[in-house]
Amino acid sequence: MTKISIIGNGAIGKEIASLLADSHYDDNQWEIVLFGKDKLEYTKHAIQDLLDKCAVYNSASIIRAGYDSDIADSDCVVIVAGTPRKDGMTRDDLLVNNAQVGKEWGNKIKKYCNEPLVIVVTNPVEQMVKIVRTVANLPYNKVIGLSGELDSARFKWHIADNLGINTQCVNDATVIGAHNATMVPVFSNITIDSNNTIAPIDLSKIDIDVIIAQVRAHGAKVTEFSGHSAYIAPATAVCKMLRAYLKNDSTRISCTAYVNNSDYYNCKDIYINLPFMINNKGIISVVEINLNESERALFLESVSATNRVLQSDIVKDICK
């Protein structure tokens, strides 16, 4: 039975567990261990609803509360713990508090686990992926961060909304770059499926600058209107990432990971969101996508900004 440890018993953590426990999710059975910062007894009560769901579907999955050494022998670890973004905050504002979360669980992964796949959801994701990977001393291809799959889904939605079509008609809407206000929605590769005909998107029918602004502000808008960070779409994106690894699907996944000496993207020694191929070994390659001159310039700006935050004193102190 595959063991998945979820660090953080808040909304995203419980939604990930719920999706995995659903008997309709690939007909798999999981051992899901949910960790919270609160006392173990509270976490047990927090997952009771998930246990009831398993009973509804007659699922054989195991869901239980965990503490420290219960992370041992995990096949996958998902880190969602930390301070969530509140209205008016940027993702980078979270580093002061969340860096210690990355350090703490990086040490526990190093102590108790044998090279699991680690998916980092906690923001700011570029810095957090670097901290967790460095502290846990894991291979570069085994630590990835939630970013591009979520941002690309939001990009796809805005394209569909602007054109008045279903999202299923929009193909290859990809976001690259940092998971913040410098992210780069890539229009060059988008095709539209209409009446069983697939054709490149007609950019004259949309306002590119408006859509870029909408995609970059999407997460903040969710927080503004709901009072809390999104959790359903992020959890779904995490499960897609888990599936690529556990099912050995060799799937293209956009995520934050370590990139070194990529001549095509002109970046090296950096943690950044790009499309990668992922299978049961973790990341196996970077996927090169077409970029026009404007998109490439915006991406290099995002790379430059990311390099600066990755060199912050907090990150350097933990990763030294």
Image (spheres, grey):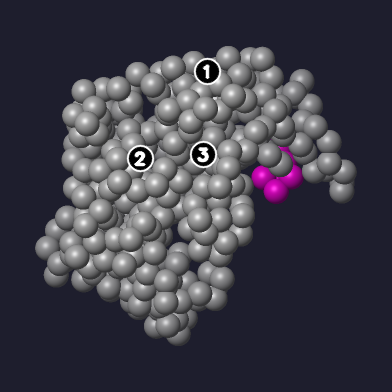
Question: Which residue is label 1 attached to?
Answer: 300
- Foreground residue, 148 or 303? 303
Of 193 and 101, nearer the camera is 101
Q: Earlier in the sequence, mark 3 or mark 1?
A: 3
Q: Is residue 52 left or right of residue 296?
A: left
Task: Classify the position of the N terminus by image quarter.
Answer: bottom left
Q: Is residue 61 left or right of residue 92?
A: right
Q: What residue is shown with label 2?
A: 129
Amino acid on which disc 3 is placed: Gly
Return the residue nearer the eye: 111 or 273.
111
Q: Secondary structure at mark 2?
A: helix
Q: Where does residue 292 sit, x and y in percent of width and height?
A: 69, 19
Residue 201 at x, y percent in the picture: 77, 31
Where does residue 196 sit, x and y in percent of width and height?
A: 87, 48
Closest to the camera, between mark 3 and mark 1, is 1
**Precedes in sequence: disc 2 or disc 1:** 2
Q: Is residue 141 above or below residue 216?
A: below
Circle 3 residue: 148
Q: CA distance from mark 3 to mark 2?
A: 14 Å
